[in-house]
Amino acid sequence: EIVLTQSPDFQSVTPKEKVTITCRASQSIGTSLHWYQQKPNQPPKLLIKFASQSISGVPSRFSGSGSGTDFTLTINGLEVEDAAAYYCHQSSRLPQTFGQGTKVEIK
Amino acid sequence: QLQLQASGPGLVKPSETLSLTCTVSGGSMSSVDFYWGWIRQPPGRRLEWIGNLLYTGVTHYNPSLASRVTMSVDASANQFSLRLSSLTAADTAVYYCARRALGGEWNSWGQGTLVIVSS
């Protein structure tokens, strides 16, 4: 099973600041890595697919990069509405797995 | 707009079998372009993939749960179902039904239903 490890677990950030979340895979997964945002009592929402591909309707301040084992989600100019948990997910090999999540709080 | 809605009991006793149904509206399940599946989230823990299926009935299960899981589909009714047997407290979680593109990303999710396993 591929283990995804995110860092940090928690981040407290001022609005308009840049946020960087990393996801490391226990083995190479190419670019089969996707990012989700989850707000309390809501299902996850797809933000980025295949490491860097944007999703229609998702603000352009969200971007992704990486390949192999190291990936990054960047929020350029955090907004108050971005307070949420963020998860990475790999679909390279079964079983699909998710990272443990990164909670982003607004200062 | 595609919508998914999971339904089932909120409370189940240990050792019993959980049955959940996901109803899909705003689109047809009869496409080879998408998988339909279940993902759960125990309180305070990471998301866990349970399994997924095609409308043809082809299934893939998480090996950690495969001995207890059965998924089925009724494409004509736009529904798919999950059965999870031999429940323990560790199965307490929010259960989500969702749609996955063949490439792998989960692009549409239901609201989720909380299942508590307790006597």
Image (cartoon, rainbow, N blue to C red):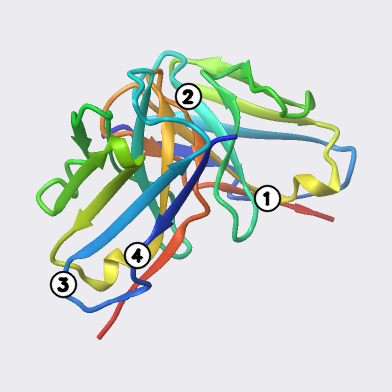
User: What residue appears at the point 58 percent right and 32 percent down from the top-left corner?
Assistant: A22
Determine contact: label 4, label 3, CB under 8 Å: no
What amino acid does circle 4 point to? Gly
| Quadrant in the picture for residue B78 | top left
What amino acid does circle 1 point to? Ala
Nearer to me, B51 or B76: B76
Report helix, strand or loop for mark 3: loop
Q: Is residue B83 left or right of residue A53?
A: left
Report helix, strand or loop for mark 1: strand
Q: Nearer the viewer, mark 3 or mark 2?
A: 3
Instruction: Write down the residue under mark 3.
Output: B16
Chain letter for the residue marked with disc 1 in the picture: A
Q: Is residue A4 left or right of residue B56?
A: right
User: What residue appears at the point 56 percent right and 32 percent down from the top-left corner?
Assistant: A35
In x, y percent, where is residue A100?
47, 47
Q: Nearer the viewer, mark 4 or mark 2?
A: 4
Q: Do dots 3 and 1 share one subunit?
A: no
In x, y percent, where is residue B69?
17, 50
Chain letter for the residue marked with disc 4 in the picture: B
Instruction: Write down the residue under mark 2.
Output: A33
* Disc assigned to residue B8: 4
In primary-sequence order, the first of circles 4 and 3 is 4
How much space separates mark 1 and mark 4, taking CA atoms? 27 Å
User: What residue appears at the point 27 percent right and 29 percent down from the top-left corner?
Assistant: B55
How much space separates mark 1 and mark 2, taking CA atoms? 19 Å
User: What residue appears at the point 38 percent right and 72 percent down from the top-left corner?
Assistant: B10
Instruction: Write down the residue under mark 1.
Output: A84
Q: Do dots 4 and 3 share one subunit?
A: yes
